[in-house]
Amino acid sequence: MSKFTFPESIRSRPIYGTLEARVGPAHLLVADAHGAEAILDVATPQMMEKAHIIYIPKGEDYEDKLRALKPASFYSGPSYPAAEPRLRKALADAKMGLQVYLAGTEGLMGQAQNAAMAAGIPHTAIQTEHRGSIARRMQCVHCKGITEEVETDPFVCSHCGLNLFVRDHYSRRLAAYQGVRVDAEDPGNVPTPKGIYE
Amino acid sequence: MTIQFNDETFRDDYSFYNSERAIKRFPFPFHEDSYMYSVNMEQHRGGPKDSVYEKRFDVDEHYVSEMRDRAMVLADDPLRCQSLPHMTLAGWDLLELIMVSKSEDYPDLFELHRDGNKWRWINKPLGIDDSFVFLDEATLPYGPMEYITRQAQGDFCVLDQRDDNLWMDAGMVTTQADWSLDFDIGMNFFEWHAPVPLAHEKGIFVRALKFLLNIQQGAPARRLNWTMTVNPLLDTSPENYHKWGIQKTTLTPENIGAKQHLRVELQTFFRLPRSNALVFPIRCYLCSFQDLMTVPKWGRRLHRVVRDLPDELATYKGFIDNRPMMLDYLKNFDDGLPTSAGIWPDLETEPALET
Ligand code: HEM
């Protein structure tokens, strides 16, 4: 799958890079879906000897390829919330110099980055690379509920049911973009949803 | 002077009003006939007698009713007041700054008695008389920032200063121009300003931040900002936008003079002594178009500013759809005569409207 180039945006929006192998006593790699490709690209046999991979396939077929890298520890789980306790444990056990690699959707990277920062990992030791779906994790500014995997603008809040438009304003703390009612000034007049970058 | 406090509402029946005095001292934000973003900052060292610049924290006729409105907003949504754990000391700094300033500037309304760390605070307009131990949270009914900002008009952002940036790590925000503290908390200066159009490109935020980082204790600064609000609604929050947004569509040529308000923020900046945080009070003043038009200079100027404002700003400020109706109203107060420089009303020297 080719990499998506995000259009230029406002200053709160995160910018993702390309993973590069770094020197370190241990390596934690977290990815979902097509993020596996970024791991396959960056992995070296030397890195894998001291690597822990946490992967959320979301229906994609990369598990065997990742296992074939022979990481010291490998986990595949059904969702980010399911994987989170294990991620937090890995971060809590981390030695000085741990290198963290995050790859895949924005929602996964944002949440895993928060977990890493909360565990005291310096941001200079955390790398990100976007791969796969350009869906966004959205917070409804009205009810505060989070809707995952939002692909269209506008979309329906999965908690309160309001029709929300997708802003570029992004909160690292929430690992989410902001959604605001689209028909507040003209109730019922909801534009036809289209892809976020269309 | 003693202040007569209005008994008024900023919601539902909107009984808010400005007295003659409040209109004359309204902080009209345009010093010339056009407007564009700029690094418009100056020292906050008093100003003309009875102007909103005179005291460190202006207290006016809306004080008691505004505090009642804040309590209602907080009861509905406690997330409007948040403080990250490392900000408690800054909260005490802010409590001290406000108590000392108000008791010195309005001795007939507020008293502060200090005996070491044993403090007694008397707020006569709100009927409060509390004794507590300074720096001991257990002796106050709320955290220090929340306690004092429930008794002070305007929103408050408390910014931590680190890595040559400012971080929005605490705040009391119930009268905001459509931005969310809950969303923005933890962001830095460039991140929370991200949605503002044109100003980043003009380098305004880089220069503004440099200025703010160097603000010293005892040398506060200030600037004015403005937007437009239909009805005198203080809580124009994004949280409640799904409820108040519709009010923007209720303007008619008949009611616009009474309903459309110019919303001005007197923003000040104070360095706090113990925490080295910066506090950013954002004091909101509302004035209806029809009240503004009683000052001929302001009538002429508001028409010209609204007419010539770039579309990006009118869109960001949320009144692009209503601008044609505003101009139809405002043009009746612009006879084309020149206006004097500066924001003051100049009632004695500016000519009456030529009809
Ligand atoms: C540290 C103190 C400050 C805080 C906490 C603050 C906060 C904010 C916030 C939350 C917004 C709304 C952004 C949005 O749309 O979500 C805003 C808008 C803005 N700020 Fe600041 N600000 C500060 C200082 C300044 C300074 C010093 C300047 C100087 C030029 C400035 C210029 C602006 C401008 C031009 C806007 C757009 C306002 C409009 O058009 O209505 N800010 N600010």
Image (spheres, coloured by chain):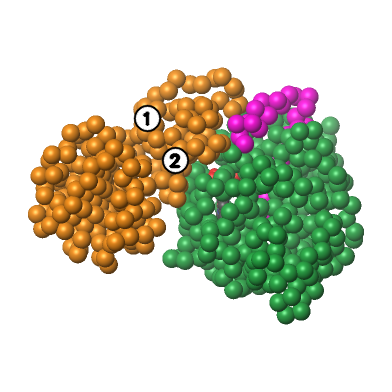
Q: Which residues are magenta?
A: B240-269
The residue at the far bottom in this view is B116
Relative to A136, A5 lies left or right: left
Q: Which quadrant of the view contains residue A20?
A: bottom left
Task: Pick the quarter of the image with the C terminus of chain B.
Answer: top right
Tell me: is circle 1 under 8 Å from ligand 1. no
Relative to B155, A194 lies left or right: left
Relative to B135, B316 lies left or right: left
Please, what is the three-letter code of the amino acid marked with disc 1?
Answer: Glu
Name the spot of residue B169 as percent of width and height, x first.
Answer: 53, 58
Q: Earlier in the sequence, mark 1 or mark 2?
A: 1
Name the spot of residue B21 as percent of width and height, x first.
Answer: 86, 50
Q: Which residue position is annotated with label 1?
A: A151
- Depth check: give the residue in front, B87 or A59: A59
Q: Which residue position is annotated with label 2?
A: A177
- Depth check: give the residue in front, B339 or B42: B42
Secondary element under disc 2, as helix, strand or loop, is strand
Q: Residue at x 39, y 24 (%)?
A: A194
- Depth check: give the residue in front, A138 or B209: A138
